[in-house]
Amino acid sequence: MRENKDPNIDFVILWVDGNDLEWRKEKARYASKKDISDDRDFKYRDWDNLQFWFRGIEKYAPWVRTVHFVTWGHLPDWLNTEHPKLHIVNHKEYMDHDDLPCFNSEALEICIHRIPGLAEHFVYFNDDMFLLRDVLPTDFFQNDLPCDSAIMNVHCCELDIGGTLCNFLNIGIINRYFVMKDVLKNDWKKWFNLKYGLNMLRNIYLLPCPRFPGMLMQHLPNSYNKSVFEKVWNLEPNILKETAHQKFRSLQDVNQWLFKEWQLASGEFVPRSCRKLGTSLLVRDTDLACNIIENQKYKMLSYNDEEISDEEFADAKEKIKASFGKILPEKSLFEK
């Protein structure tokens, strides 16, 4: 296994304080009835567990060069903004002026390559993705290429939830530039790789498709080369600009997975097993999530919110915090 020629790897995370009254006022000024997808309250609930994200980074990924913390302008009260590895990024620093203010995470994500000082190799996290054990640079990049799993998928759509058409738009762009049969023939060792386990059968079953039907997206941190963002933006500036200009999610959006799929279709990746690396759970799986956290069964865990009652949320919140507190009890230097 070869190390990266460039050892510098950054982490990027987007964060919003849904309780910020000024943010809520500005959001309400631009919102309309068609923006119902972003008005679901659970999307902005405060789990009060971000400190464990930073504790995990400090303990389990001390090699990271810079953490780019992207925000509308608000910050957690406890955050040590003087930490030498922390770069606070306001939306204004990398989004075009005519695209602001922006409340659309998909728009913010597709522009992150413009963050000042961002390394060529970076890992993008949602704020519900946590490290539970030591991770190495080679978990994310090998030989200067992102590590990933090339697995095809058939997408299903829900029209009442904004943004779900992203998968179709993303793969449509991929099929504009890549011929599936050629990709599978030229990089067959990467697409039919035993590291994918039973998921490799998806690629076998979908071989008769005339073009890529879609790609399986695991809800885990994604490794990216910044140059891929720049390449796709140069090729498809109009559709990307259209998404960047949407202040709220819309059915016409593409998202960051477009660049992930480009890396896969172009062969610019190293195969890995995501299943061994981490798993993704919903709030309904809180007890299982707590067990995974406390026993550190994976290197990473994505714990996703969903529509539950306030009582269920309060119970889940305390359980998750207690579990994180068992493996990460001490403050990090990212905290005051």
Image: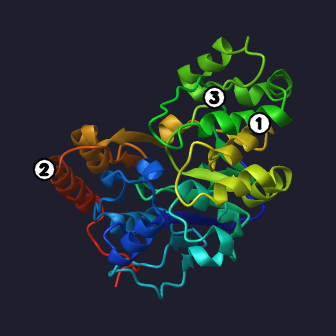
Residue 216 can be seen, yes or no? yes
Q: Position of residue 161 (x, y in %)?
A: 45, 39
The residue that appears at 76% across and 38% down in the rendered structure is 173
| Amino acid at circle 3 | Ile
Residue density around tag 3, few if under 14, some if 14–19, many if 20 or more, within 10 Å: many
Mark 2 vs 3: CB contact within 8 A: no
**Quadrant of the image occupied by residue 180:** top right
List the residue tagged with mark 2.
Answer: 311
The residue that appears at 33% across and 75% down in the rendered structure is 21
List the residue tagged with mark 1.
Answer: 174
Q: Helix, strand or loop at disc 2?
A: helix
| Amino acid at circle 1 | Ile
Along the line of sight, the residue nearer the viewer: 238 or 265: 238
Q: Is residue 48 left or right of residue 217?
A: left
- Toward the front, the furthest residue is 33
Residue density around tag 1, few if under 14, some if 14–19, many if 20 or more, within 10 Å: many
User: Could you tell which of marks 3 and 1 lies nearer the N-terminus?
Assistant: 3
The residue that appears at 69% across and 76% down in the rendered structure is 117
List the residue tagged with mark 3.
Answer: 151
Q: Is residue 287 left or right of residue 275?
A: left
Q: Helix, strand or loop at disc 3?
A: loop
